[in-house]
Amino acid sequence: MKANYHTHTTRCGHASGSDEAYVLAAIEQNFDILGFSDHVPWPYASTFRNPRVRMDVTQIEDYLSSVAKLRAKYRDKIRILTGFECEYFPAYLSWLAETKEEKGIDYLILGNHYDRSDENGMYFGRVHTPKELRLYVKDAVAGIESGLFVYLAHPDLFMRGGYPFDGDAKAACKDLIAACLEYKMPMEYNVHDRYLYNVTHRISYPNRDFFEMVMAAGVPVLIGIDAHDPDEISNSRQWDIAEAELGGYRYFLRHLPELTGAK
Ligand SMILES: [Zn+2]
Ligand SMILES: [Zn+2]
């Protein structure tokens, strides 16, 4: 089985390519499962909108119907799932749970990008102090505990802005590991930044030190392309490198059985 659950669309305002182009790329790369998980729109209480980060709530129907059409059109070739990548925004989580039920969304992944809301919360890709790092961990753990999400995307996001793997980072990693083990939540080995900067080495995530601790602890890990362009799927270099890095790991997951019923 070959599955990628982390795929965006142009609706988020910072991705390119048609929805169908992502599907065709995945078929060409022999994926069995392609999950769309575009950045969820939040029903902001304020007038705040974030069109370069996420779609508007009014675009949900278009997103879901487009994916449903592709699912039907390519059903003999690939299994397509509908999802969202979501933060832990407490004020809007009941809306999220209801929307998932109501719209028959297959799954949600936890991408802990902002503290409590992007209306005024900090961006966790630019963590610079231990205090900010604790906020990141607190929100991530609360998200894991919420039971809404199937996996934790780029758990090492806090290192994107150059935060070192120091004692505080180790403590953060330890807390994330403990929560994931307790709630049986896999972590994602996210290859997007290596694609973006056209490198084979780690520049932000996945961070080697972080994942050495994760693997020593036995947390299940799966690869996420985090595709913002169909070429991230077509160009298999980053996927192959990640597979080589994880291939020998006992808890490397190639798909999420609970989403497909397949073994
Ligand atoms: Zn994005
Ligand atoms: Zn993403």
Image (tube, helix red, strand yellow):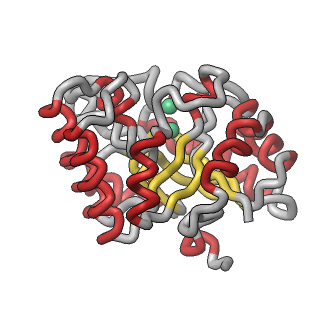
Left or right relative to 203: residue 18:
right
> Is 36 situated left or right of 85 in this image?
right
Q: Image point 51% across, 63% down: which residue?
A: 104
Q: Position of residue 197 (x, y in %)?
A: 60, 20
Measured as percent of width and height from the top left, residue 136 is found at: 24, 40
| Frontmost residue, 241 versus 97 | 241
Q: Residue at x 63, y 58 (%)?
A: 81
On screen, residue 117 above or below 216: above
Q: Is residue 109 left or right of residue 98?
A: right
Q: Quadrant of residue 17?
A: top right
Q: Is residue 242 visible?
A: yes
Rendering quarter of residue 246: bottom right
- Toward which corner of the image does residue 200 lie, by quadrant? top right
Residue 76 image offset from top left, x and y in percent: 86, 64
* Whole-percent x, y for residue 32 in the image: 76, 61
Say if 33 sits above or below 181 in the image.
above
Q: Residue at x 40, y 28 (%)?
A: 160
The answer, for residue 150, to whether it is visible in the render is no
Image position of 196 with respect to 62: above or below: above
Q: Quadrant of the C terminus?
A: bottom right
Residue at horizontal 26%, vertical 57%?
94
Of the 4 image quadrants, the one containing the N terminus is bottom right
